[in-house]
Image (cartoon, rainbow, N blue to C red):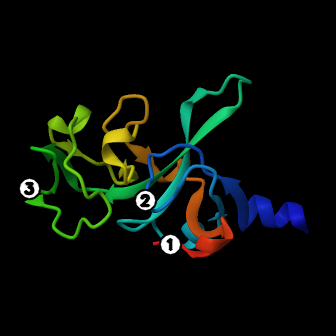
Amino acid sequence: MAGLITNYVAFQSTGEGISMQPVLENNDSIIIDKFSYKIDSPKRYDIVVFPIEDTDADGKKRYFIKRIIGLPGETVYIDDGRVYINGSLLKSEKYGKELMKEAGTASEPQTLASDEYFVLGDNRNMSTDSRSETVGLVRKEDITGKAVFRIWPFKKFGGLN
């Protein structure tokens, strides 16, 4: 039963790094929902987990956790430190509070395919995300799940937004 749950429904993971601060801190223990995206599509501002091509020192696949900013079919670019979607400034951007110093590959407009997402870390200037060729655009089939709940540290126990 436990194997079925962790393979198809949800699993616990520990976040590493500072790219999602202040929402997620280094070593936060979170629950990843693997089931939701089997019946629905990711939404803007969902926090998702996905593998990257790189491996860790032990040869294991590395996973990143980032926030979805651009949706399939949209054109995303970054100009003067701000995100633009289909030519309009992303006004409801409440997660990345600082101007981005590096636009990376998003310095030129990127039109997303029908199965691609543009992701950014909340700590924009300390994040390797879709602006980097290492990560690039994330395909729906590569998204492992959605981070939905923090279980540790206990003082921050609760849902993630």
Q: Is residue 148 left or right of residue 122?
A: right
The residue to which callout 3 is attached is: 87
The residue to which callout 1 is attached is: 40
Q: Are marks 3 and 1 in contact (CB under 8 Å)?
A: no
Q: Between marks 1 and 2, how big is the CA–CA gap?
A: 27 Å
Secondary-structure class at tag 3:
loop
The residue to which callout 2 is attached is: 22
Q: Residue at x 48, y 53 (%)?
A: 140
On the image, the x and y values in percent for residue 102 come to: 22, 35
Q: Camera-side residue: 61 or 123? A: 123
Crowding around mark 2 (Cα neighbors within 10 Å: few <14, some 14 to 19, many 20+) is: few
Residue 149: in sight, yes or no?
A: yes
Q: Nearer the viewer, mark 3 or mark 1?
A: 3
On the image, the x and y values in percent for residue 2 come to: 88, 65
Give, as a three-letter code, the residue at label 2: Pro
Q: Is residue 42 left or right of residue 9?
A: left
